[in-house]
Image (cartoon, coloured by chain):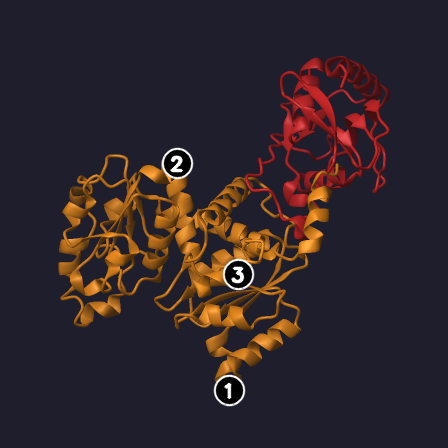
């Protein structure tokens, strides 16, 4: 698949800068969602020169389908090395699809504190939302069939692939 | 083997957790891996997770135990379950209500899991055979038969310190005869591939034909500790001191009590474990129990993570086979 992830990221960084300026936010926190979101957030964190350390979130324990599918052992622990209360958070993920991952991420974030706001930046928005969640910054929108699966490979280089599900 | 099979569903996943026997190395490893994730969560400021939200877990204790009950309760609460603590000896069974009636009543209150401790061996199996299909049972110690969650938390502690089970020499010291912990430890160690498991005890505190479990027997503590990587001490019930099994506490400590001097026979990086509570000056010196090689307090912390893992894995065994394929697809959603 021929998508230049790094140039998408550079554009996303510009859009995030503009968004933060528009909202008058000077000192945001950035949190990446495991695994692809963390790879992207590491890049954006550097590009935007964010002062606070990068936070990482593993939402496995917050999934709403746990009782149906169980969970994957060896969950990477979440790491939020800052106080979230009254801070503006930029949440980063690779693919926005049904919105359920973001629902879980928001639940987990609110277990740590009450941020002033949470904005979402995603590399790919493939539509077909099941929950009312939207990204503030999107790298690329894609129309995919329900039997297609998009995945970010990384961390270096970052590469997107689309596969058909069996 | 028949007893072991009740523990897993047709897909080979954990359903009840009653004994280590009959469980595969992959199930034990899955529990250890899951516990590792929960251990990291327990170290965070916010320790509560929503995994068992809406579930009701009953600590059904027919035998008193503050420590084990507390860690099960804490594990369940950290998973957001509702917890009922029922001390059965002081409750309805003394009014003539049968065990099965008690179970039926608890099931009618929509309970999802029973954590059972009982003085009779096999009690947890009996309950697991009679509960409703949606209920899971965890054995928190039955008679002198098994204490599988203690054994797994011991394995977790060993793995954290030593990494690879495949190169270890482990000694279990003390009252093997009456110890449900020792029996479960031996099965867990051999299942996970520990090449040399030793038991060190006087003749009177060893079951007949213990060698058939794949262990090496020693009666001399110094000889048995030579070059071991892990020492698992067992609790000695003080009441047995007065019986015919042992002459006195003092003599037991002289022969089998762990001291710095005897510890010198083990490997320099040996770790010392004990299921607690310790009889100081009987099973081991305070200097050893509180020394740098003791991991006894870590075992207590690990007990919560391991019990969270076992509860979570046992409770997830709800889906029907037809649902499983759909569920795997759902896992990929974003």
Chain under numbered label 1: B
- Identify the mark at residue B16; answer none if there is no mark: 3
Quadrant housing residue A24: top right
Asked whether the residues under marks 3 and 2 belong to the same chain, the reply is yes
The percent coordinates of residue B213 (x first, y second) are 30, 56
Comes first in the chain, label 2 or label 1? 1
**Residue at 41% in and 55% down:** B150
- Residue name at image x 63 percent, y 20 percent: A155
Chain containing mark 2: B
Nearer mark to the viewer, of 2 and 1: 2
The label number, if any, that marks residue B163 in the structure image: 2
Under tag 3, what secondary structure? loop
Question: Foreground mark, 3 or 2?
Answer: 3
Q: Secondary structure at mark 2?
A: loop
**In this image, A50 relative to A138: left or right?**
left
Q: Can you tell which chain is drawn red? A: A
The x and y percentages for residue B35 are 51, 45
Residue B214, position in %: x, y? 28, 52
């Amino acid at each position: 698949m021929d998508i230049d992830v790094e140039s998408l990221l550079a554009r996303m960084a510009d859009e995030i800068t503009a968004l933060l300026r528009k909202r008058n936010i000077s000192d945001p926190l950035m949190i990446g969602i495991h695994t692809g979101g963390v790879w992207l957030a590491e890049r954006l964190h550097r590009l935007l020169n964010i002062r606070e350390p990068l936070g990482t979130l593993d939402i496995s324990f917050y999934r709403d389908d746990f009782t149906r599918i169980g969970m994957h052992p060896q969950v990477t622990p979440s790491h939020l090395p800052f106080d979230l209360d009254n801070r503006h958070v930029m949440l980063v993920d690779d693919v926005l699809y049904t919105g359920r991952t973001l629902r879980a991420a928001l639940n987990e974030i609110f277990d740590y504190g009450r941020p002033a706001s949470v904005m979402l930046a995603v590399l790919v928005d493939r539509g077909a939302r099941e929950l009312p969640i939207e990204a503030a910054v999107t790298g690329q929108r894609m129309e995919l069939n329900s039997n297609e699966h998009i995945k970010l490979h990384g961390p270096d280089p970052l590469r997107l692939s689309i596969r058909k599900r069996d | 083997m028949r007893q072991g099979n009740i523990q897993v569903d047709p897909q080979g996943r954990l359903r009840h957790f009653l004994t280590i026997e009959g469980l595969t190395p992959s199930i034990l490893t899955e529990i250890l891996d899951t516990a590792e994730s929960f251990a990291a969560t327990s170290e965070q400021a916010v320790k509560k997770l929503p995994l068992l939200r809406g579930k009701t877990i009953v600590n059904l204790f027919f035998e008193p135990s503050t420590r084990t009950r507390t860690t099960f309760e804490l594990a369940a609460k950290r998973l957001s379950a509702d917890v009922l603590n029922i001390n059965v000896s002081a409750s309805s069974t003394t009014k003539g209500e049968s065990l099965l009636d008690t179970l039926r009543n608890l099931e009618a209150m929509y309970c999802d899991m029973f954590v059972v401790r009982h003085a009779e061996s096999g009690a947890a199996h009996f309950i697991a055979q009679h509960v409703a299909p949606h209920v899971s049972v965890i054995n928190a110690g039955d008679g002198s038969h098994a204490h599988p969650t203690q054994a797994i938390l011991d394995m977790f502690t060993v793995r954290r310190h030593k990494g690879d089970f495949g190169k270890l020499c482990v000694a279990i010291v003390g009252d093997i005869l009456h110890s449900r912990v020792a029996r479960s430890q031996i099965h867990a160690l051999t299942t996970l591939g520990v090449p040399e498991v030793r038991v060190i005890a006087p003749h009177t505190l060893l079951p007949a034909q213990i060698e058939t479990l794949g262990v090496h027997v020693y009666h001399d503590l110094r000889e048995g500790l030579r070059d071991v990587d892990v020492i698992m001490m067992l609790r000695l019930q003080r009441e047995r001191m007065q019986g015919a099994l042992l002459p006195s506490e003092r003599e037991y400590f002289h022969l089998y009590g762990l001291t710095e001097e005897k510890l010198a026979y083990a490997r320099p990086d040996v770790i010392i474990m004990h299921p607690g509570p310790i009889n100081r000056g009987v099973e081991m010196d305070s200097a050893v129990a509180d020394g740098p090689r003791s991991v006894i307090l870590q075992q207590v912390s690990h007990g919560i993570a391991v019990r969270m893992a076992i509860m979570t894995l046992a409770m997830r065994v709800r889906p029907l086979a037809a649902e499983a394929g759909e569920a795997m697809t759902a896992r990929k959603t974003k």
